[in-house]
Image (cartoon, rainbow, N blue to C red):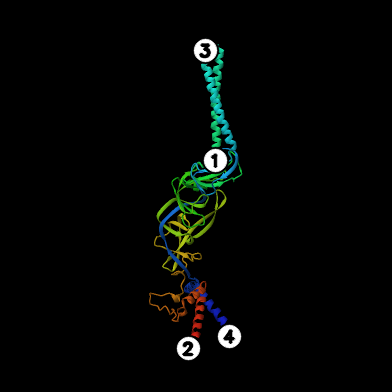
């Protein structure tokens, strides 16, 4: 117990002595040593800055539609007796789609024809009488009143003939309309009624999508709507698909925003279509607004975001100011923070306008906990490799670690080595060393038992 108290007192005196020297300026070396011992080295991965093409894009979802969708409405009312087409059928112009019961219309047509015949007979009769009265009048054998009556009868017969002809035309049209025909070439996208249903004028029976082309209509907020111009190229991708399914161009643009939603309509005409494009499919429309060549590009995941709260004295409101930076590797040993001015954003790629040089190597893994001037160790390979597995100048023996001890991974099969590497993922350096030491001891015990 006395020895322990004496040792503690000695250490206390030693620390006090060191503290006194620091006051006089003589302890600076010790403080620097303590600081260096406390600063840890962070393992990071770096990447070159990409120089390439980047585009400012507007993205929005919309459904593909046929450019022309025609509603087929019956012109007469009666029961449907035959349906000749179904959903998805391709039809041609004037093809018969359905048949409506025509008994009534056939009778009306026969009656109209009979009426025309009667009117023609009446015209011939009254015409002859009028001509006879004119001859008698020339011979003073009749009165003017008789002539006027014959003339009126003749003109009335002519009017009745014209009326009968009009009724015949209407009856013939109604009879022909009992066959519902396709007005254009296209595909049946809607069949509203079935055989036996009552078809009536003004009720839609079919919808036909013209095969002349497809379009997609999207609705954009005001800023994107202003940026989009007629003629901009568009790539269309079916929802949940990674590849481009069609290409198009902005063909029309609404001149005003919707008063209720505040959105502006943009119409995209498809110029190239794949097998995945059909009416009604949901697609993502990607409109290229601006494209830049030879731009410096970094990944969004490499950025470090800083948010500062600023009070606006004019409006007495709190604003958030966001700044972005990256860490670059200086000499593969020190991290240097660079404030960035960003430009176009395209997915995970972001254009850098200033703050970097094309030759810089940016830190893409491990940068979240760094500060300007932090010590780093740049890892190589797909994953952070163990020091025992890394060759130096091609001269180190891959079966021997830097401590001169046998590397236990060298005596394993590929499967065992993969399992060992997977087990070491996420371990600290001390844990990995202990794990390798345990493997080495197990291999030594196995070798001893085999030799005995």
Q: Secondary structure at mark 4?
A: helix
Cα–Cα gap, marks 3 and 2: 153 Å
* Label 3, residues with CA under 10 Å away: few <14, some 14-19, many ≥20: some
Cα–Cα gap, marks 1 and 3: 55 Å
Q: Secondary structure at mark 2?
A: helix
Task: Identify the residue position indicated by label 2 in the image.
Answer: 451
Mark carried by residue 136? 3
Q: Earlier in the sequence, mark 4 or mark 2?
A: 4
Cα–Cα gap, marks 2 and 1: 99 Å
Task: Identify the residue position indicated by label 4 in the image.
Answer: 3
| Pick the front one: 259 or 402 | 259
Q: Earlier in the sequence, mark 1 or mark 3?
A: 3
> Do the CB atoms of the residues marked 3 and 2 lie less than 8 Å apart?
no
Cα–Cα gap, marks 4 and 3: 167 Å
Q: Earlier in the sequence, mark 2 or mark 1?
A: 1
Q: Earlier in the sequence, mark 3 or mark 2?
A: 3
Cα–Cα gap, marks 4 and 2: 50 Å
Labels 4, 2: front one: 2
* Label 1, residues with CA under 10 Å away: few <14, some 14-19, many ≥20: many
Q: Is residue 234 visible?
A: no
**Residue 218 x %, y %:** 51, 48
Q: Is residue 378 above or below residue 407?
A: above
Labels 4, 3: front one: 3
**Residue 156 x %, y %:** 56, 21
Cα–Cα gap, marks 4 and 1: 118 Å
Task: Identify the residue position indicated by label 1 in the image.
Answer: 179
Labels 1, 3: front one: 3
């Amino acid at each position: 117990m006395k020895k322990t108290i004496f040792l503690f007192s000695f250490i206390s005196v030693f620390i006090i002595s060191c503290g006194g020297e620091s006051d006089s300026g003589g302890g600076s070396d010790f403080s620097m040593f303590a600081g260096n011992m406390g600063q840890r080295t962070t393992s990071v991965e770096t990447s070159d800055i990409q120089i390439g093409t980047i585009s400012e894009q507007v993205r929005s979802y919309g459904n593909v539609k046929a450019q022309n969708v025609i509603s087929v409405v019956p012109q007469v009312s009666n029961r449907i007796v035959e349906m000749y087409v179904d959903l998805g059928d391709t039809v041609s112009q004037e093809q018969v789609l359905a048949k409506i019961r025509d008994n009534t219309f056939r009778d009306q047509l026969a009656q109209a024809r009979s009426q025309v015949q009667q009117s023609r007979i009446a015209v011939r009769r009254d015409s002859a009488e009028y001509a006879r009265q004119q001859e008698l009048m020339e011979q003073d054998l009749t009165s003017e009143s008789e002539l006027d009556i014959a003339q009126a009868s003749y003109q009335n017969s002519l009017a009745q003939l014209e009326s009968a002809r009009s009724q015949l035309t209407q009856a013939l049209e109604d009879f022909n309309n009992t066959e519902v025909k396709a007005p254009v070439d296209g595909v049946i996208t809607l069949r509203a009624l079935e055989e036996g249903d009552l078809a009536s004028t003004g009720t839609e029976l079919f919808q036909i999508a013209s095969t002349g082309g497809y379009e997609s209509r999207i609705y954009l907020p005001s800023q994107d709507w202003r940026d989009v111009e007629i003629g901009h190229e568009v790539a269309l991708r079916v929802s949940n698909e990674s590849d481009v399914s069609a290409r198009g161009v902005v063909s029309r643009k609404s001149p005003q925003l919707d008063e209720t939603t505040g959105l502006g309509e943009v119409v995209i005409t498809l110029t190239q279509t794949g097998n995945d494009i059909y009416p009604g499919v949901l697609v993502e429309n990607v409109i290229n607004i601006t494209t830049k060549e030879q731009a410096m590009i970094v990944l969004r995941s490499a950025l470090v975001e800083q948010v500062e709260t600023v009070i606006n004295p004019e409006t007495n409101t709190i604003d958030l100011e966001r700044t972005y930076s990256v860490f670059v590797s200086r000499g593969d040993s020190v991290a240097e923070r660079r404030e960035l001015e960003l430009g176009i954003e395209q997915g995970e790629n972001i254009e850098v306008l200033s703050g970097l040089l094309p030759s810089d190597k940016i830190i893409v893994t491990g940068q979240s906990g760094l500060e300007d001037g932090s010590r780093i160790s740049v890892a190589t390979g797909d994953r952070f490799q163990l020091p025992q597995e890394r060759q130096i100048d091609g001269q180190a023996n891959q079966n021997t670690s830097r401590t001169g001890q046998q590397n236990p991974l060298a005596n394993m099969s590929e499967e065992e080595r993969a399992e060992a590497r997977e087990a070491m993922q996420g371990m600290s350096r001390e844990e990995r060393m202990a794990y390798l030491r345990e493997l080495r001891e197990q291999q030594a015990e196995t070798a001893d038992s085999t030799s005995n």
